Image: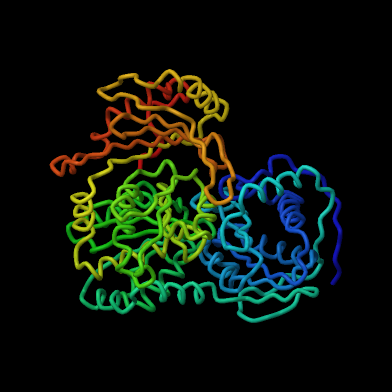
Amino acid sequence: MAIQTIQTTPVAGQRPGTSGLRKKVGVFQQAHYLENFVQCVFDTLGDLAGKTLVLGGDGRFHNRAAIQTILKMAAANGVARVLVGRGGILSTPAVSCVIRKYEAMGGIILSASHNPGGPDGDFGIKYDIGNGGPAPEAVTDAIYQRTTTIASYRISDAPDLDIDHGGRSYLEQMQVEVIDPVDDYAELMEQLFDFDAIRKLFASGFTMRFDAMHAVGGPYAKAIIEGRLGAPEGTVINCVPREDFGGGHPDPNPVNAAELIELMARDDAPDFGAASDGDADRNMIVGRKFDVTPSDSLAILAANAQVAPGYRGGIAGIARSMPTSSAADRVAAALGIPCYETPTGWKYFGTLLDAGLATLCGEESYGTGSNHVREKDGVWAVLFWLNLLAVKGQSVQQIVEEHWQRFGRNYYSRHDYEGIDAHAAKVLMDDLRVKLAALKGVEMNHYTVDFADDFEYTDPVDGAKATQQGIRIVMTDGSRIVYRLSGTGTEGATLRVYLERYEADPEQHHIPTQQALAALIAIADSVASIAYNTGRSNPTVIT
C-alpha cells in the first residue's frame, strides 16, 4: 500500500447548494470529480491528525463506490479514525447523532436527500461540522474557492475494505470501524420518548403504516417501530434501501407517497400513517383521511412538547424557515418563548440550537427536528407523533382540529414549478425585485399589501448575514406569498411559490386548501407573470 499524489485540474461548478453538492450520478462518476471535491474538503479542514471522521450515506447508486474512495483519501490525508456505517449506510440524522456522541471532527454524508436515485438519478455529498450540523456558508464557501484552484489530490492505492461486517481494520495508518447504523440513534430515541407508552399503544390494537420509500429510513423504522416498540410485522413497508429507491421518488409528500395516501384514504385505513425520504431527514404525517401539513406538525409538536420525556422541562424557543407558515409563531407567543425566522437551510438553525435559544425547528419542506441532533430528523418526528398519540388518546384529526380551535388555522400550500429554464427563473426573480417597492398599499383580490421585500437575515448569535433569501409579499391580514428558487435540484431551476392565509373562525376551518387560497394563487401568478416567464400554466407539484 502507498499514498499517491494525483495531478488534477479544477472542475467548474462544484459550489455546494443549501445542502451540499448535488449532481447527476454520471457527473460524479467522471474522472477526478469526487476526488477533487473531497480533497478540497480535507484541505479546508486543515490538520487532520488525531481526528475522527464519520462516513455514511443513504444507499443510493454510487454510494458504495464513493465510500471506498473517501476512505482511501481520508487515510492519505492523515485522518486518524473513520466510523463508517455498515454497508455504507447511515441516515443523515444518524450521522449527526454519531458525530455528537463520539465527539468527531465532523462527517461526510453521501446523499441527494429526496432526489431520485439509480444510475440515471442524482448523487450528493456534504460535510457536517463537529456539532453534527451542516457546514455553515463560511466553510462551504472556502471549500468552493479551493475547488477553483486545486492541482492535486492524495489517495491510497489500498484495496477496497470490507464494510459489510462490523469491526475494526486499518487502511494505511487510519483505523476504520464499521458500526451498526441504527444502534446509537435508537439509543438516543429511547432517551427522548416514552417507549413504554408507545408499546402500550400498539398493544391496544393501534395500527400504523410507515412507508420508508425503499430509502435509508427503512432500517431505522423497522428496528425501532417493529423491533423496540412492538408494532406488528408489516407496519413498516418498503423498508429495504435500494440503489434506485425501487424506481420511486423518495420525497415524502402526497404526490410521491401516493401508495400511502391511497391507503390512508380508505375506510379501513390504519390509525396513523407516516413516511420518510431518501436520507431519512424528512417526514410526512397522515391521519385516517386527513393530511397534516409540515407547518402544522411543527406547531402541534411545540404546543405539546412536554408529553415526551426529553422535552418535559419545556422548550426554550422555536425556529422556522421563512417560507414555513407562521402557525409556530402563535404557539411561541402563547408559551411566552421566542420564534426565530431564518432562511431556508438547516444550517441556519445550528447556532440557535448550540446557544440554547431554540429547542424545536422546522421547515415547510417536510423537515422537523430538535436540539437532540443538528439535522432535521424524519424518524424522530414520527416517534414524537406516536408519543403524542399515546398520551392524548385521540386521533390525528382530533389533535389537529383541537389545535386549530385554540390557535386558528394557517391555510398553507406550496406550488413547485420544476425543471424550468434557469435563465427564465432568474428573470422572473429579478423582475419581482424591481416591483417590490411599488407594491406597498396596493389592493388585489380583496387583499392589501402591507409590505414586500427580499428576505434578509442576521444571525442573532454570530452576526452572520444572508441576503436574497426569498421574496415576500405580506398582506395587512398576515396572509403571505413567498417566491424562492430551490437549491436542491440538479437540472434547470425549481420555482417554489408558498401561499398562506390565516383563519381564526372555527366555522371556516374546513374549506379545501386550494379553494381557501384561490385569491392568493391568482395574485401570485399575476404579480410574477409565472405563466409568461416559465411557459407553465400549472405547477408541477402542489403540496
Residue occupying image coordinates x 56% and y 30%:
422
Q: Quadrant of residue 57?
A: bottom right
The colouring scheme, among rainbow, by chain, secondary structure or one colour, is rainbow
Q: Is residue 393 left or right of residue 12?
A: left
Up-down relation of residue 40 to residue 107 (above or below) = above
The single residue placed furthest to the bottom in the displayed view is 167
**Quadrant housing the C terminus:** top left
Q: Is residue 200 left or right of residue 154?
A: left
**Residue situated in front as seen by the camera: 443 or 162:** 443
Residue occupying image coordinates x 20% and y 41%:
504
Q: Is residue 360 left or right of residue 235?
A: right
Residue 302, percent across and down?
A: 33, 58
Residue 297, percent across and down?
A: 33, 54
Up-down relation of residue 463 to residue 245 (above or below) = above
The single residue placed furthest to the left in the displayed view is 507
Residue occupying image coordinates x 62% and y 63%:
130
Residue 224, percent across and down?
A: 40, 74
Residue 346, percent across and down?
A: 51, 52
Tally of numbered discs = 0
Up-down relation of residue 540 to residue 297 (above or below) = above
**Quadrant housing the N terminus:** bottom right
Up-down relation of residue 227 to residue 428 (above or below) = below
The single residue placed furthest to the front in the displayed view is 336
Q: Quadrant of residue 467?
A: top right
